Image (cartoon, rainbow, N blue to C red):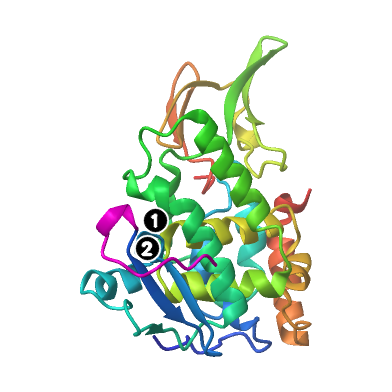
Amino acid sequence: MALSRPRCPSPPPPALMLDELVEGILLRLHPDEPAYLVHAALVCKSWRRILSDAGFRRRYIDLHRSPPLLGYIHNIYQSRTCSPRFVSSSATASPFSPPTTINSWGALDCRHGRVLIHNKLRLVVWDPVTDD
Amino acid sequence: MAAPESGDGNNGAARMVTLISSDNTRFEVEAAAASLSQTLQLTILDGGGGGGDGIPLPNVDSATLSKVLEYCIKHAPAAANGGAPNATAVDRAELERFDNEFVNIDQSVLYSLIMAAHNLEIEGLQSLVAKKVADMIKGKSPMEIRRTLGFPDPTPEEQAEMNAHMLEYGWAYE
């Protein structure tokens, strides 16, 4: 088996030069703390490439079975208006917050990482990850 | 390592095989333990490694092979039971205790084990050492991860790129 060509200008120790060995390590970073994967992605270019590979994503889901619960959406009622807030279940600060333009909206349901929010007139599907 | 007479399972004696490290040290070990290595399993099934012959392992030195075999000998009985579905909680707890202690080692030894477990395709050991490294880096910043794992200092370009990404993913550092 040939060693992968080192892509980092400052190469890692030999035991961490094979992509599949690095992948084996990164697969075992626990999904409950997504920040661990972000930190790992910033270590060097080759780690970033491994982590962004579709195969890695598939194997990560296979290994950890269910996607992690990053948090939940909580409707906050204040002065007769309602606004959904994202409550993080992780120790890491959450990057998700509903756009400020959706005050007076309430969250109805969450499916597959998307949130259905509504006011009296409209229904909107919000994707917290992409903020669309 | 105990070295009873090589046999073929006669008189209840377990079949033994000999493994030869890169520095020419011979290790006699039960075939069942060595067979935890997918790489060795076929050779052993074909009758290799017995008698005066040994299986040469040019990529594994004697210190590392000794450590690898310590793992294999401990895990062989459970592996023989097909992943030990009948193992008692006590057995499992004992294996877990062994595993935790087993990877409590110098980083250079850990790295040698990573390579050996990969070359010999010992699935349980690969998983154990990978988990150990993952535990070493969790909760650390990218720079701390680099230092912990023995990367050289980043080049100015790498450092700039790291800083830029950290700005983008600032939430992960709060």
The one of B28 and B114 positioned closer to us in this rendering: B28
- At x 72%, y 42%, the residue is A93
Q: How far is mark 1 from mark 2, CA to CA?
A: 6 Å
Q: Quadrant where the N terminus of chain B lies?
A: bottom right
* Residue in view at x 53 percent, y 76 percent: B115
Q: Residue furthest front?
A: B11
Residue at mark 1: A59
Residue at horizontal 76%, vertical 78%?
B159
- Magenta segment: B1-13
- SS state under label 2: helix
The chain that hosts pointer 2 is A
- Looking at the rendered structure, which numbered label has been put on residue A55? 2
Name the main secondary structure of what is drawn in magenta.
loop
Label 2 Cα neighbours within 10 Å, binned few <14 / some 14-19 / many ≥20: few
Label 1 environment density (alpha carbons within 10 Å; few <14, some 14–19, many ≥20): some
In the rendered image, the vertical position of residue A8 relative to residue B126, given as above or below? below
Count of numbered tags: 2
Element carrying mark 1: helix
**Percent from the top left, x then y, of residue B152?**
75, 83
In percent of width and height, residue A128 lies at 54, 40
As for residue A48 lying within the magenta part, the answer is: no
Is there a contact, CB below 8 Å, between mark 1 and mark 2?
yes
**Can the viewer see residue A33 in this picture?**
no
Q: Amino acid at mark 1?
A: Arg
Position above or below: A127 against B51: above
Name which residue type carries label 2: Gly
